[in-house]
């Protein structure tokens, strides 16, 4: 692979072989950074995400009064504010991170200050009304610009609410739980489709009381969190990021003699649905040495592909919500499957860092694929051959990485424009991919 400042050239590969230890889970890193900054004492975190987004969360916590020290052994020490944030001297810069902006809004809303949350151009296009609604019901005063950032929060005491989430969103759920942690009374939140539960595990790890009950009928779950709680610092090692693992898992599926081992990967059941999808597509997965740390499951994963090759599948409903971040790379390899992949009920992809449905469609067509684009997804037939092309990442890290995987089995070289965006979540991505690919 060769690169300039913004373009990465991907050459076709013969196979994928080797082992890899992934950087810390981005979702968990965000949550640990925020709760450590809120808690009493000094939290020590190993294998913190190397992506830019969680480091935006760290910088915001520093601006709110926490102390962050990067140690030589690559651990990060965060001395918290004991639940008392200071008013920042400037706007809180969330960079490209919707997770930082939405979750942090809930954490800071109960504090007697004025906070303004800003971000890059991509972040100013993402919807923020979804957090204003529940936080306003709790008594927060939040100003948006036509439903988007910058977000100005006039903080003050909050009251508990009983909130039904209108869309499956772990970020909205987290904003409500973080606010409820400090509100007067017990806040309840019901979600009909279960989203990733890292916030629940993280809150309990830091000492919070949090209850989850299942409704008598259906799959709806209610979370309840009493207010006015204090948190205590922890020592933790963050599991490897399974969303980052997705790219390499999909790459391994493309070659009949591939063999890939991923060490220390997060196996949280609300995220590990990806492994079920990989298996359904024809991947052969072995999970070894599973352990639990602070409520999170961690294991070693070995993957290669069935001799019968890749099958297709239909992804919709709760599954689409659970693997929303992994859908772009699954779509990118869909033409190489025998039966194609259909993705529906994934309209949320249109309001991520980019319109991921539109960009996946555009780039697959550039590589010679036929497909049908829907408002909530894609229908991508199988048994297609792709050729190298000029790929528009839209400065979206997951699009850049997804089409780097599709390029491995294409005919000819592929150029990924805006490849530097991979650093948002996975700065080492291209180096690892180059090391694993055999040509």
Image: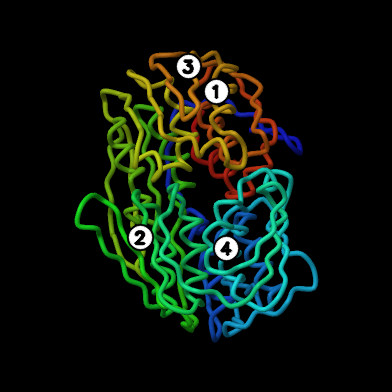
SS at mark 4?
Answer: helix
Residues tagged 1 and 3 counted as in contact (Cβ below 8 A)? yes
Residues tagged 1 and 2 counted as in contact (Cβ below 8 A)? no
Mark 4 crowd level (few <14, some 14–19, many ≥20, 10 Å Cα): few
SS at mark 2?
Answer: strand
Distance between mark 1 and mark 4 Cα atoms: 37 Å
Residues tagged 4 and 2 counted as in contact (Cβ below 8 A)? no
Residue 39 visible, this orientation = yes
SS at mark 1?
Answer: helix
Q: Which label's residue is closer to the chain start, 3 or 2?
A: 2
Task: From the image, tell me which residue sits under label 2.
Answer: 298
Distance between mark 3 and mark 4 Cα atoms: 42 Å
Residues tagged 3 and 2 counted as in contact (Cβ below 8 A)? no
Q: Which label's residue is closer to the chain start, 1 or 4?
A: 4
Q: Which label's residue is closer to the chain start, 3 or 4?
A: 4
Distance between mark 4 and mark 2 Cα atoms: 37 Å
Vertical order, 284 against 167 (above or below)? above
The label nearer to you, 3 versus 4, is 4
Task: From the image, tell me which residue sits under label 4.
Answer: 136
Residue 77 visible, this orientation = no
Vertical order, 26 against 256 (above or below)? below
Mark 1 crowd level (few <14, some 14–19, many ≥20, 10 Å Cα): many
Task: From the image, tell me which residue sits under label 1.
Answer: 361
Left or right: 291, with 360 as reference point: left
Q: Which label's residue is closer to the chain start, 1 or 2?
A: 2
The label nearer to you, 4 versus 2, is 4
SS at mark 3?
Answer: loop
């Amino acid at each position: 692979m060769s690169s300039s400042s913004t373009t990465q050239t991907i050459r076709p590969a013969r196979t994928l072989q080797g082992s890899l230890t992934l950087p810390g889970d981005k979702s968990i890193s965000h949550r640990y950074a925020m709760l450590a900054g809120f808690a009493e004492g000094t939290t020590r975190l190993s294998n913190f995400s190397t992506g830019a987004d969680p480091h935006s969360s760290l910088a915001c916590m520093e601006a709110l009064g926490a102390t962050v020290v990067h140690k030589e052994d690559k651990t990060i020490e965060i001395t918290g504010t004991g639940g008392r944030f200071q008013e920042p001297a400037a706007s809180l810069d969330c960079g490209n991170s919707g997770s930082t902006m939405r979750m942090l809004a809930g954490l800071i809303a109960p504090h007697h200050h004025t906070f303004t949350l800003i971000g890059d151009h991509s972040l100013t296009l993402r919807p923020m009304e979804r957090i204003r609604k529940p936080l306003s019901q709790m008594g927060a005063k939040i100003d948006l610009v036509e439903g988007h950032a910058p977000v100005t929060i006039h903080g003050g005491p909050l009251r508990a609410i009983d909130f039904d989430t209108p869309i499956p969103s772990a970020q909205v759920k987290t904003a409500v739980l973080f606010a409820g942690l400090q509100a007067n009374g017990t806040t309840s939140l019901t979600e009909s489709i279960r989203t990733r539960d890292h916030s629940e595990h993280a809150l309990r790890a830091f000492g919070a009381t949090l209850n989850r009950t299942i409704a008598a009928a259906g799959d709806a779950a209610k979370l309840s969190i009493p207010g006015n709680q204090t948190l205590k610092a922890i020592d933790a090692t963050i599991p490897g990021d399974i969303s980052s693992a997705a790219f390499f898992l999909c790459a391994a599926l493309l070659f009949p003699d591939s063999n890939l081992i991923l060490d220390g990967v997060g196996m949280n059941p609300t995220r590990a649905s990806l492994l079920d999808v990989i298996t359904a597509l024809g991947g052969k997965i072995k999970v070894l040495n599973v352990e639990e740390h602070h409520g999170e499951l961690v294991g070693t994963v070995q993957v290669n592909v069935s001799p019968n090759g890749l099958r297709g599948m239909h992804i919709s409903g709760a599954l689409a919500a659970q693997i929303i971040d992994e859908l772009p790379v699954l779509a990118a390899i869909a033409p190489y499957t025998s039966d194609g992949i259909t993705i529906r009920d994934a309209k949320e992809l249109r309001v991520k860092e980019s319109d991921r449905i539109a960009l996946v469609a555009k780039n697959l067509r550039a590589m010679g694929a036929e497909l049908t684009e829907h408002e909530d997804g894609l229908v991508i037939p199988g048994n297609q051959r792709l050729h190298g092309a000029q790929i528009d990442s839209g400065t979206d890290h997951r699009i850049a990485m997804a089409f780097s995987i599709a390029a491995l089995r294409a005919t000819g070289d592929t150029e990924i424009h805006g490849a530097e965006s991979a650093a948002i979540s996975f700065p080492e991505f291209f180096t690892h991919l180059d090391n694993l690919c055999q040509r």
